[in-house]
Amino acid sequence: MAARDVVLMTTHDIGRRLHSYGHRSVVSPHVDSLAADGVRFARAFCTAPQCSPSRASLASGRYPHNNGVMGLAHHGFDWELDPKVPHLAAVLAASGFEGHLFGGQHVSLHPERLGFSRHHPEKTGDAIVPAVEEVLSAAGRERLYLEINFEETHRPYPKVDGTRAPEGIDIPAYLPDGPEAIAEMVALEEGIRLMDLAAGRVLEALERAGRADDAIVIFTTDHGMAMPGAKCTLYDAGLEVALLMRWRAGEIPAGVRDEVVSNIDVLPTILDAAAVKHPPGVQGRSLLPLLRGQAYEPRRSIFAEKTFHSYYDPMRCVRTEHHKYIRNFESAFAIEVPADIQAGPIFRADPPRYSRDRPSIVELYDLDADPLEQRNLAGTREVAEVEKRLSAELWRWMRETDDPLLEGPVRSPRYRQAIES
């Protein structure tokens, strides 16, 4: 059988910071209900630690350097989903789905080109939910694709009483455990709470409309938390994402999956659930066989990249079960801390701690012994064979995917416009 509807909910900059992922101070019961009633992927990663490239991979099933979005798709940066690469909305529309976009989409300056029937531009959950309810109440027998993108968890965070620290709040181990981190986590978790309330109302509306059982419902995040040492880095703190799926009528048992998966796998999974043919060029692999207990070859590794964010900062990585290998293609820069993170109290309390140079052109970490990726083993005898193997694997992936970095520095859209005008 095929899923009748597709509901994809996303939020910004929280990585896996949900109650269902073990963060007990986080109030996220509605999103967590998907984990309880469906599947929680314990080790899901994104293809890029930034909003637009990661979301473009989610929407296309391709790596950023293959879908055209290697930097931010905002005015002033101007990265754009390649017109030859269909957005998930367009693929589903071609098979008869009526697509609705709620909130921002961050992969194109021209949302009208993406394939949605209608764009509902409301920003906050309080405004988005009535629009979702209206679409569901008016829907007939048509199949629906609802893409719902919440903003509450993006900086600047909601204002809260800075003295109110939740009992047992945990500070990520890569951050200093002090008042600044507590203040930021309290504010972030308030944003998560507000987002979760809106997500819960969407789930309730789906139930009232009688469409919950036959819909594949997915919740995910774009990349790791907007904290120093996470967002905009290829360390696990920047690449880890929450990924929850529920399809009651789809013979998917509830539970936790420990396999390593990538967010490029979401699109082919949705298409298989909806019985829609994959467009050419999809690089992700469907998770549906895994979820149904059928033949599935787990990924031995995932790949991720960064090319542009605030500036040109090209790097690529391969992550296996036990190791992370990063190659930095420009050595002159410090580890990037985006401007919105620099404005926060954690960074301002100790800028030199985070405004530090990269360890080297090549970074190699033993994730079992060093999960925070603080001891670079590249060039040491103890991991020489591992380094050789992962280097070859990364270069092979870059060749197989026609990575433009193989030809030299990548030009930004603004640079191309300047030289062509």
Image: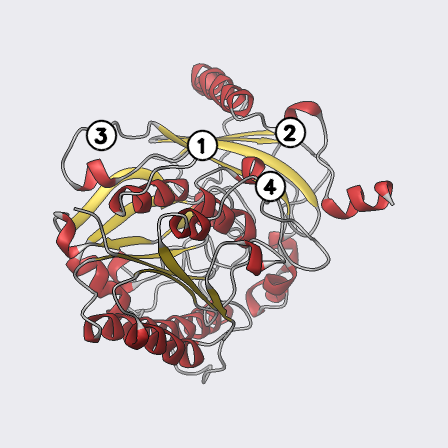
196 shown above or below 284: below
Q: Residue at x 67, y 44 (%)?
A: 334
Tell me which numbered mark, 4 or 3, is placed earlier along the sequence. 4
The kind of residue on which mark 3 rests is Tyr
Looking at the rendered structure, the kind of residue marked 4 is Gly
| x and y, in percent, of residue 296 in the image | 22, 30
Q: Nearer the viewer, mark 4 or mark 3?
A: 4
Residue, disc 1: 280
User: Secondary structure beneath disc 3?
Assistant: loop
Please say whether residue 166 is visible from this viewpoint.
Answer: no
Residue type at mark 1 is Pro
Counting residues from the start of the chain, the first of labels 2 and 3 encountered is 3
Where is residue 329? Give x, y as percent. 66, 31
In the image, 335 versus 271, the foreground residue is: 271
Q: Is mark 4 on a helix, strand or loop?
A: loop
Given residues 117 and 285, the one toward you in this image is 117
